[in-house]
Amino acid sequence: MQERVGGSEKEPSQEQGERGRNDVASRPSTSEENGRNDAARRPSTRDENGGNGAANWLSTGDERGRYAGSDGAGRPGVLVIAHGSREPGWVAQVEQAVAEAKAKLPPELPVEAAYLELVEGRLIQDGIRALEARGVTDIYALPLFVSSGSTHVDEIGWALGAYAQPRRETDLEPVAMQARLTYGEPIGSDPEIARALADKLAPRSREPAAEAVLLVGHGSDEPWFYEAWRRELEGLAAELVRIGGYAGADAALLRPDETAARIAQLRMRHPGARLLAVPVFLSEGYFTSNAVPGRLAGQDIDYAERALLPHPAVSDWIVGRLQAWLAGRAARLEV
């Protein structure tokens, strides 16, 4: 899921400048340049499961929640939120990952996939309605995005009511919801995804101890979002070195363009090492096939082009996050 180009995020598989949002009843178009100052803000909440604060509980005064028809414990349900695309194959890969995850979870747990845009009838509000129609009173919303540095992760969290204000203005409308919310964290530096990157690199690698790897992500020109992107990709790079046995690894962002500078630094730190590059994008598209190789051109670096989907580590990551939430929820209910 990539950020819009030129200050706004773009559809994952389209050329730069593509906006193309559907006018559907579930939510209006979003635009990160045209903010809403008069939107109703929801109370700030904090994460009860640890982490960096991206996952939060909506406080209702009673942590276990008591809704009409609830026995006090409520019914949990899951909403996996991806960006969306007009390309059926892109959506099918997300649906496959969610289906694979669902098969490893309790069969009675409702799990829905939803999209920020471009998938009519499957948007975030649609997903919330579907879960609530099944009696769900506690929703875990998991953003299927690479980094908390994505402005989409931030605006989705605000729209869901996870915190009082977004870090930047957005015209994304608040989502109507009766259930209590836990907003999960995106991939970040998760070891499951480092394993996927190692698998992607394996066909290109010859002698890991004599190789250095550059991870390439989208990034952001805005300081807080940039720092989140850099921190999390550096965490993935460190984990990749640990599990793959590489001599070293670093991360470069497309915004701002750091690829040439980071390659030069890798060469200085690991003289004589063979260099490999791997994109950290969920889906195939413009960035993996055009933008990244364009930045790497002439750099004498071997590029492992494929995106993360459909690697099974993505569904394993989903399962891990959901199991942790279910375990934490069960522990609270036992108190």
Image (tube, rainbow, N blue to C red):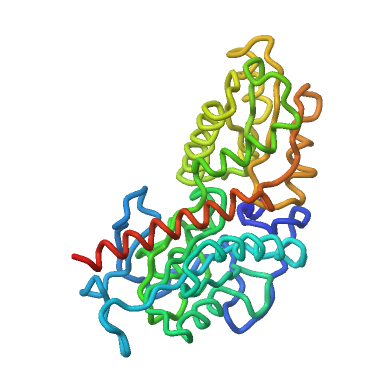
- In the displayed structure, 108 sits above or below 223; it is below
Q: Is residue 127 above or below residue 314?
A: below
**Furthest residue toward left:** 335
- Residue 327, picture quadrant: bottom left
In this image, 179 relative to 293: left or right?
Answer: left
Q: In this rendering, would 122 be left or right of 159? A: right
Quadrant of image for the C terminus = bottom left
- Work out whether 220 lies above or below 318: above
Q: How many marks?
A: 0
Q: Give residue 61's position: percent from left, percent from top.
A: 21, 74
x, y percent for residue 140: 43, 67
Residue extending farthest to the top is 271
The percent position of residue 209, horizontal first and vertical second, equals: 62, 17
Q: Quadrant of the N terminus?
A: bottom right
Of 1 and 236, the residue lying toward us: 236
Q: Is residue 135 left or right of residue 11?
A: left
| Closer to the camera in the image, 289 or 210 | 210
Q: Residue at x 81, y 24 (%)?
A: 298
The residue lying toward the viewer, choosing from 217 and 28, is: 217
Q: Residue furthest bottom?
A: 69
Quick check: 4 above or below 276?
below
Percent from the top left, x then y, of residue 198?
63, 34
Q: Identify the residue shown where x is 75% and y is 24%.
A: 301
**Which of the two residues, 169 or 150, is positioned nearer the viewer here?**
150
**Residue sitting at 22 percent across and 66 percent down?**
334
Q: Residue at x 69, y 75 (%)?
A: 22
Quadrant in the rendering for residue 202: top right
